[in-house]
Image (cartoon, helix red, strand yellow):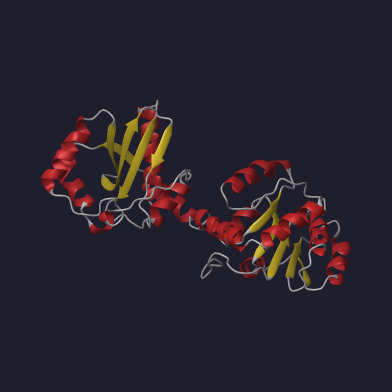
């Protein structure tokens, strides 16, 4: 509910949220406040959240009271509201990372426990948090990085957008869909699928996201299908659930790499099945072609849904292809 109406953060930082966990045994909250005191941002409103059992509660209460525009929240019941109102956060690398991402909050994340190190490393690589490799107790280094992030609107917008794309709040729905459906099974296409494949490929929904948006004549389609079925390096799979077609995946294998293309059949688009279909096809490929070690994908410019599908499925952008007609 809190996510409704929220767009990726843009513009200046007018409000900052500081939350390093309910207990924060090492009082990293105090370190962050020290770093903020070294940055000249008189118009910045700061919300500081701690738990009722924070070991330095009284000390932090006095410190926050002495700092203009700083509000201390103890054991707040309005965490979602604070997250939706803030422009930037400083936080730890625990499970709160996913809450901030879901609400589009760009974050400078600090590793305050060993079990957070790998999570922050991968989250930083994925562009969903800003996670500088500094000691959480180093207020001078923290001030440098915080000042830099506040001054970089483009980076903050990117972190916000990437976080919202990856953690979209629909995980429970997807898990329920998989549990209810029993999963997607993959089978190789045959000549008997020709009519269906032709109809699916020529549907406006599929053509609209294809590299070739034109309709394909049935004789041309049949020749293409014959070539695919006869090829030892091209694999055409149909994903089904309880006998109902979900989508089509093709792998073009060259040495140890495979180029993947995918589409959902009309009627299945928008049902959250794309990632399940791709994962099922990848599992089929691993089992039947174990020599394949790399998957590549080409996405038409403007096809945001496919871009997000591949990004959420662990693919990363390596290059951009430009084209010009003469």
Q: Quadrant of residue 267?
A: bottom left
Q: Is residue 228 above or below residue 50?
A: above
Residue at 37% x, 54% y is 301
Residue 97 image offset from top left, x and y in percent: 63, 54
Q: Quadrant of residue 49?
A: bottom right
Residue at 51% x, 53% y is 166
Is 222 displayed left or right of 127 in the figure?
A: left
Residue 244 image offset from top left, x and y in percent: 26, 47
Is 115 displayed left or right of 284 in the figure?
A: right
Front residue (pair 54, 27): 27
Residue at 68% x, 42% y is 117
Residue 239 image offset from top left, x and y in percent: 30, 43
Q: Is residue 63 above or below residue 310?
A: below
Front residue (pair 244, 226): 226
Front residue (pair 21, 38): 38
Residue 131 image offset from top left, x and y in percent: 67, 50
């Amino acid at each position: 509910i809190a996510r409704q109406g929220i767009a990726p953060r843009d513009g200046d930082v007018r409000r900052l949220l500081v939350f390093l966990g309910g207990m924060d045994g090492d009082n990293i909250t105090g370190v962050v406040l020290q770093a903020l005191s070294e940055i000249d941002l008189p118009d910045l409103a700061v919300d500081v959240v701690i738990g009722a059992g924070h070991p330095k509660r009284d000390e932090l209460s006095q410190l926050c009271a002495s700092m203009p525009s700083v509000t201390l929240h103890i054991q707040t019941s309005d965490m979602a509201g604070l997250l939706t109102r803030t422009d930037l956060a400083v936080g730890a690398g625990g499970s709160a990372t996913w809450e901030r991402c879901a609400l589009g909050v760009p974050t400078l994340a600090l590793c305050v426990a060993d079990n957070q190190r790998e999570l922050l490393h991968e989250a930083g690589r994925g562009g969903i948090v800003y996670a500088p490799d500094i000691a959480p107790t180093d207020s001078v280094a923290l001030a440098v990085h915080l000042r830099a992030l506040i001054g970089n609107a483009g980076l903050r917008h990117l972190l916000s957008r990437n976080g919202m794309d990856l953690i979209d709040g629909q995980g429970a729905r997807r898990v329920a869909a998989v549990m209810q459906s029993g999963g997607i099974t993959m089978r190789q296409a045959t000549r008997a699928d020709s009519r269906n494949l032709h109809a699916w490929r020529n549907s406006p929904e599929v053509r609209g996201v294809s590299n070739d948006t034109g309709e394909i004549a049935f004789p041309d389609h049949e020749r293409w299908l014959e070539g695919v079925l006869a090829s030892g390096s091209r694999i055409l799979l149909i994903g089904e659930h309880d006998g109902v077609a979900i989508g089509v995946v093709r792998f073009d294998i060259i040495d140890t790499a495979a180029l993947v293309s995918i589409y959902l059949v009309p009627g299945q688009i928008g049902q959250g099945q794309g990632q399940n279909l791709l994962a099922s096809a990848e599992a089929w490929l691993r089992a039947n072609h174990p020599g394949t070690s790399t998957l590549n994908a080409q996405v038409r410019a403007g096809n945001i849904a496919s871009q997000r599908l591949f990004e959420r499925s662990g693919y990363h952008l390596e290059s951009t292809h430009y084209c010009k007609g003469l």
